Image (cartoon, grey):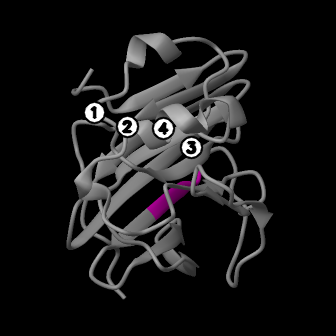
């Protein structure tokens, strides 16, 4: 639903993608208001050729080894030459997770400025495709660049294992 701006999950692994808003160049900012639980939030490649109904179950996630060939088969020219296809911030502890859906993935990586968040916190993400960076904010305070080397198109996304709820809003980044 392209009007939906909130996600609430139950049991299982649930993933939501803002697929109606692909970011291909420039600077983009979104805020994720955490209202329950500890979701994973970040960016993923747009996959318009992927049959979404095939993956509509309670255990879908972008790090599932069994699905990576399907994800790579959905590749479009807009992805460019970059190899980071998913990048998540884990709200529970601030760690970074990313994969290229081929042979490389990094799970639970520490990064400079890393902080976790909890219910009531607002996590901002600044995707700068001119510089190739994803910067994380917590309650309007810049934590730092979580990932660099990004290129091509991305969508905002969120995943959860268990109960979580959040809202997402595209807006202007906090003033420096």
Residue ID for mark 3: 34
CA separation in Å, label 3 and label 2: 30 Å
Which range is magenta? 120-124
As drawn, 169 above or below 131: above
Q: Residue at x 47, y 27 (%)?
A: 7
Decide: few, some or many residues near mark 2? Use Cα within 10 Å; few <14, some 14-19, many ≥20.
some
Vertical relation: 149 (above or below) 125: below
Tell me whether circle 4 and circle 1 mark residues in contact (CB < 8 Å).
Answer: no
Question: How far apart are the alpha carbons under marks 2 and 1?
Answer: 7 Å
- Structural distance between the alpha carbons of marks 1 and 3: 27 Å
- Circle 4 sits on which residue? 71
Disc with the residue nearer the chain's start (3 vs 2): 3
Residue 78's spot in the image, x, y percent? 24, 56
Residue 18 visible? The answer is yes
Kindly identify which residue carries mark 2.
Answer: 74
- In the image, what residue occupies the spot 20% across and 73% down? 26
Using the rendered view, name the quadrant where residue 15 is placed.
top right
In the image: residue 29, left or right of residue 137:
left
- Residue of label 1: 48
Cβ–Cβ below 8 Å for labels 2 and 1? yes
């Amino acid at each position: 639903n392209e009007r939906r701006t909130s996600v609430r999950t139950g049991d299982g692994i649930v993933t939501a993608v803002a697929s109606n808003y692909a970011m291909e160049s420039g600077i983009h900012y979104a805020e994720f208001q955490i209202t329950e639980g500890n979701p994973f939030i970040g960016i993923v490649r747009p996959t318009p050729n992927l049959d979404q109904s095939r993956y509509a179950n309670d255990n879908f996630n972008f790090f599932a080894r069994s699905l990576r060939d399907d994800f790579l088969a959905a590749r479009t020219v807009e992805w460019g030459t970059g190899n980071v296809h998913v990048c998540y911030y884990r709200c529970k502890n601030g760690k970074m997770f990313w994969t290229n859906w081929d042979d490389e993935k990094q799970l639970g990586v520490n990064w400079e400025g890393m902080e976790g968040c909890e219910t009531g916190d607002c996590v901002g993400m600044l995707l700068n495709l001119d510089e190739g960076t994803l910067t994380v904010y917590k309650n309007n305070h810049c934590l730092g660049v979580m990932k660099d080397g990004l290129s091509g198109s991305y969508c905002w996304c969120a995943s959860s294992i268990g109960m979580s709820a959040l809202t997402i809003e595209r807006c202007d980044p906090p003033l420096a």
